Amino acid sequence: MNGARALLSTLVDAGVDVCFANPGTSEMHFVAALDDVPAMRGVLCLFEGVATGAADGYGRVAGHPAATLLHLGPGLGNGLANLHNARRARTPVVNIVGDHATYHGRYDAPLQSDIASIAGAVSGWYRSTTRADDVAADAAACVAAALGPPGCVATLVLPADSSWSESATGPCPPRPRGRPSVVPADTVDEVAKALRSGERAALLMGGSSLRADGLHAASRVAGATGAALLGETFPANLERGAGIPAVERLAYLAEMAQAQLDGVRHLVLVDAKSPVSFFAYPDKASDLVPAGCTVHTLARPGEDAAGALETLAEAVGAPADGGSPAPSERPRRPSGPLSAESLAAAVGATLPEGAIVVDEGNTSGLFVPGATAGAPRHDWLTLTGGAIGIGLPMSTGAAVAAPERPVLCLQADGSAMYTLQALWTHAREGLNVTTVVLSNRSYAILNMELQRVGADAGGPMARRLLDLTDPELDFCDLARGMGVPARRVENAEDLVTALEEGFAEPGPALIEVPL
Amino acid sequence: MNGARALLSTLVDAGVDVCFANPGTSEMHFVAALDDVPAMRGVLCLFEGVATGAADGYGRVAGHPAATLLHLGPGLGNGLANLHNARRARTPVVNIVGDHATYHGRYDAPLQSDIASIAGAVSGWYRSTTRADDVAADAAACVAAALGPPGCVATLVLPADSSWSESATGPCPPRPRGRPSVVPADTVDEVAKALRSGERAALLMGGSSLRADGLHAASRVAGATGAALLGETFPANLERGAGIPAVERLAYLAEMAQAQLDGVRHLVLVDAKSPVSFFAYPDKASDLVPAGCTVHTLARPGEDAAGALETLAEAVGAPADGGSPAPSERPRRPSGPLSAESLAAAVGATLPEGAIVVDEGNTSGLFVPGATAGAPRHDWLTLTGGAIGIGLPMSTGAAVAAPERPVLCLQADGSAMYTLQALWTHAREGLNVTTVVLSNRSYAILNMELQRVGADAGGPMARRLLDLTDPELDFCDLARGMGVPARRVENAEDLVTALEEGFAEPGPALIEVPL
């Protein structure tokens, strides 16, 4: 068999059986091999940023990686922003980048570029396979590296001749899956001591700690010690809803985050980074840890955060039933004009059990988390790296990973335009994604940021660069152009109905919500 | 004044008065300063690949750079593919990338990434300005580097505090513009000797040599010596049409290019690279220079290619009127079914004087160059770096650079989807761009390449990854969703009418041509 087939067989044997692809000529042997390895599902994306964002969504939901298939340096470039988000989410991604044949590189043909340099910015692991005989072993190593823990973007560059040449070795068996390392007992003891000090304390939960088991244990700790439960601002995959203890996420705005942290003397990081301002602002602090606060690290990325929290709960003498799961409650079905508040109520009133919410709602989506706190249990995926344009692609991957679960994509209009091509894949694959476009016809967050950075703002030229009204985008036309049924709603009642239909009916739908 | 205002004033003083922008928070002071420096025109793009492709088109047509404005590493990543194309075209581009404030980088906030690593793949010049006092001088150096000659992508990273802090220096005057260096006399003599040898010879014209003056001189050389006139496969900006000597472009397919070069004993490179296969293929040569052929270099990038050709024409004793300008002739207005041939005839029959043709027609556009060879004088811009998705953005920039000239964008459907957001900017800025979408509902070139690479192709999984029929894209819906009037034509007569209306009426239009 050739290198391409050995690669695909190795990936499938290691559990990587979905590939979000946007191939070109140098990837044609990989494409041809799909018919030889039918267990690999190729999902065509019309732009590389869709493929990489889908791989991020898939990895966050499945817990194991999908593959991408990108076309040389420029294809990698197109996918880079969502790989950046995946890097920040520590999502496992097997990132396959086709390249010229090894001997062709020296001719500096038009598509030649420095792939290693581009990939370096996002990759936790990188290798270029220069012989077909090495492809399978390198693929197995790539999957293992992607899985970690912690997960990472593992980039495997595949020169065309490594793909088309015969592989003497054939497929390679999967490597043993890595396991999170156990947090040392003295680390837990130190944190327990701090929490029992009587001084004001908070746990800042992030990464792998934001699933039900970690949240239950943390909630027991909070109940026993009075520590506050905070969550990182942009979680990769937060489990929440009725029956799951809630965390209060740190606010995006530094001023508000500082208020949340005010007076805390012990901040315990649980697979989370020490809090910093998202951007710098003139005369404002970047480091958000209050003066006089000691920062403790209970669990680092790749460590067993939930296990450490359970050990900690025992150490502080928390009863087994000492947690505080969120009660089951929904807002009433809203009526009347559309607003950020009625939008939030409509989602809260309709969100189904087991839903996956992909939240790139930005400013317009501000009230939705509050309105869904008591909705049936669901997952919440956010923009981890600040590179906008992930909502529609991440929904693609989430829906492929969990075809039986409804996916709700809360998508701000400005961000939607970066990777709108994902809608076509929603339609082609019949994905159960209900996309709600929050259409305020503005880069609203930048109007706010323009004031916050202290710029003498508000001149007509500046305002025009943040404005999306001339011309207005019609997301129903855009969706229909890619085969996704779409409707614009005019009031909250219509929105509730549209959401219910979107969740009930198979396949994708788009709802444009003018705000 | 602050660093942002000093930067903008310096750019405007150096003739850089258009900025294709997709800003974020770290660029807000730049945005605010636009109202202080009204000579700078900010053009909002809804995706960074639109901004960079527009800067490429602008630079190719204007001969001096536009600026971009991108948001940190992920924004640069989104713009990287079209910067790759600009690098290959040697287009002058002032590529401005906002960054976190210098002191904020160490906190590794979510958007932090290795900008230098990403930019390295496309930049001929790179600098990160760490003090507001240096911004103006660095901007002047950036413009000078971008202009070359040869032109390049010059990347200036602008940390937010360099932008918002006071600049003690204020704006910096422009640096003297670099001039192409004169080709040494003995280089011309060597080429003249080879051309007079009586052995078969060809000039391979590229880069700056493909404008009227260089083509006239080359045509005189060809007339006097019998040398063939060849053009590089993908020119940045080829001047052509009635009254301009024609060059035969080297074919994309290596087999066809080898036939064009067969028997050539002296190949003279005129601001062109020695011919190589675009991709590698099993058992096919990468280097397309025939055995026994000597390669001579008349002019390198940054040298005065047209001047060298004129000196060469004198050296080989070519009479002043010895060139062969293309005759004026147009195909008849076609009728009947739409096909690649009738499409070509429709364009040939209607192309207006002074048009700028942006050609990303790929396989479906194959016959258009032939049908327009005798059309009124026009410019022809192509995909120089193989990174598809430049047609609509490049048209944006071309139309901004030359608002009085009609722009015809020949756009293949698969490639259109990479940077479709450019249509919104066409509408917002009222650009005179007539976009013809060549809709064959396939990555047609890949179906061909699948065979050429020798893959055992044609399985249903492989074919599905190259197919755009399920669902079909409706480009009229997509265009209308972004404010561009659109129509689908059903026969050649309708296409002729639609083209004539598109060229005659101000503002953008889109014509979908099912093929």
Image (cartoon, coloured by chain):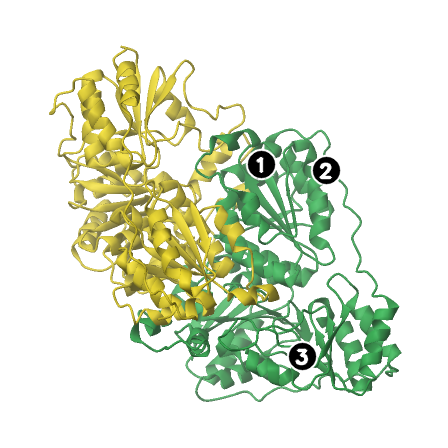
Chain colours: A yellow, B green
Name the spot of residue B488 as percent of width and height, x first. Answer: 42, 75
**Which circle, 2 or 1, is nearer the viewer?**
1
Disc 2 and disc 1 in contact, CB within 8 angstroms: no
The residue lying toward the viewer, choosing from A238 and B486, is A238
Q: Are marks 3 and 1 on the same chain?
A: yes
Work out whether mark 2 precedes mark 1 in sequence or the reverse, and give the earlier one. Answer: 1
Q: Nearer the viewer, residue B273 or A124?
A: A124
| Disc 2 residue crowd, few under 14, some 14–19, many 20+, Cα 10 Å | many
Residue B376's label in the rendered image is 3
| Residue A449 % position (x, y) | 47, 35
Instruction: Report which quarter residue A250 is drawn in.
Output: top left
Mark drawn on residue B171: 2
Q: Please tell me whether mark 1 sits on a helix, a strand or a loop.
A: strand
Q: Residue at x 88, y 78 (%)?
A: B315
Q: Which mark is residue B159?
A: 1
- Answer yes or no: do the residues labelled 2 and 3 have beta carbons within 8 Å? no
Q: Amino acid at mark 2?
A: Pro
